[in-house]
Image (tube, grey):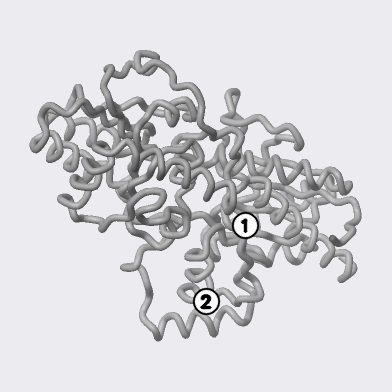
Amino acid sequence: MSKVHKRTVVFAMNSPSSVGGMWERVARLYDRVAGLLQERGVSSIIAYPELSPDPAFSPNHMEMCAANLRALSSANMPEVKSFIEDHKVGCIVYADMRLRSLGAWRLRRLGVKTVNCCHWGPTESEKPPLWKRIAKAAIGWFDFCHYDLYVAVSKHQYYYLTSWVGVPRRRVTLSVNGIDVKRFSPGSAPAPEEYGLPRTTYYALTVCKARREKRLDFLIDVAAELFKRCPDISLTFVYVGDGVCRAEWEEKARSLGLSDRFCFLGHIRDITPLFRLVTLALLASSREGFGLVTAEAMSCEVPVICSDLPACREIVSHRETGYLLPLDDLDTWVRHISKLLDSEEDRVRMGRLGRKRVEEFFSLNRQAGEFCQIVCEQLALLDHRGY
C-alpha cells in the first residue's frame, strides 16, 4: 500500500445520536479505519456539528470534536479554513451528504480531498428518464460539482451513482458494507421479561427508524391477518426504533387489537441480545441502500424475511438464508412467516447458512481495510500533486 505523509483525516458526521442505530454503526466503522490509519502515522478526528453528553459511540482511535464541516458557505469558510490549517487536514470523509449539497470545490481550493460514503437507497420509481440521465452524465464530466470520490456500500448504490445520477465512474468506488461478526453472534438468549415482552413461543423482530419508507404499518397489517388466520399462535411481533411515525404505528396496532401482540420497545442501543431471543427478523422497507440490520440478524443465525429490493438481494439468499418477498403482497408475507414458524429445521438451516454468508462476504474487518486503503490513496494523491 502507498506510504503517506502524516496528515489528519476528518470523519464529518451529522449527529452523535443513534436513533435507528445507523450513525452509531458508521462511527464504529470509522473508528476501525482510524485505528488502521494510526498505524501509518495518520491521525483522525470525528467531527459533529454539536457534541452530546451521551454520544451513541465513543471512539478509541480518534479525537472527537465539535466542528460543522457539513454546511459550507462564504460566511463560515474562514472558520473552516482555520480548522483545516490548525489540524493539517488532508481529507474529509462525509457520510450520506447529498449530491451537490456541499461546496466540495471550496475544500478543493484549500488542498483538501473529499470522500462521500453513500448509504441511502433509491427506489425504482425515482429512476430519472433517459434524457435526464444523459444530461446529468454530461454535467458530471466537468467534475466541479462532485466530491473527489464516492464510496458505494452496495452494488446497487454503485449503479445508482453512475447510471442514475451521472457521477463519473472514475469518481466512484465500491466497498460493500460490513458488520462486526464477533459482536453480532449467536449466544444465550435473555429472558423476554427483561424487555417487557410476554413469554411466547416465537418472536418476530423489526429494527429500523420510524420513517414512512420502512413500512412497519404494512407489517402491522401482516400481523393482523396472521392472527386472524391462526388466532392461537404463540407469537409476538417486536419493533425496535423511534422516529416520526412511531406514534402513528402504535395507534394502528391498538386499533387492530394488537396491543399485546405487537410490542414497541423504542430505541435500544445494543440489539444483539434481542437477535439471540427472536425467531426471525422482518424488514418491509420500500428502499434500502444496503440493509445492515439484515446482515446483523443473519450473523446471529436469525433467518430473515425482507422486501425484494436490489440491495437486499445482495445480502439475503432467497430460500437459503431467508425470503425475499414482493412489497405489497400481504398474503405471501403471511404464508412465508407461517412457513418458517412451522419448520424449526428450515430456521436452523437458514440461520447457519446466513451466519456463514455474512462471515464470508460482509465482515467489518474487510470493509475497514478497504476504506483505509481508499483514504490513503486520496492522501497519496495530495502528496503527489504537491498540495
**Residue at 57% from the left image edge and 61% from the top image edge:** 152
Disc 1 or 2, which lies upstream in sequence? Answer: 1
Q: Residues within 10 Å of mark 1 (few under 14, many from 20)?
A: few
Work out whether residue 326 can be spotted: yes
Quadrant of the image containing the C terminus? bottom right
Q: Position of residue 368 (x, y in %)?
A: 69, 49
Q: Position of residue 322 (x, y in %)?
A: 37, 49
Which is nearer the eye, 41 or 16? Answer: 41
State left or right for residue 43 relative to residue 348.
right
Q: Position of residue 59 (x, y in %)?
A: 69, 33
**Residue at 60% from the left image edge and 39% from the top image edge:** 180
Residue farthest toward the front in the current orientation of the protein: 345
Quadrant of the image containing the N terminus? bottom right
Secondary structure under badge 2? loop
Which label sits on residue 166?
2
Q: Which residue in the structure is indicated by mark 1?
A: 73
What kind of residue is marked 1?
A: Ser
State left or right for residue 210 relative to residue 1.
left
Q: Residues within 10 Å of mark 2 (few under 14, many from 20)?
A: many
Secondary structure under badge 1? loop
Work out whether residue 110 can be spotted: no
Which is nearer the eye, 17 or 279? Answer: 279
State left or right for residue 274 relative to residue 85.
left
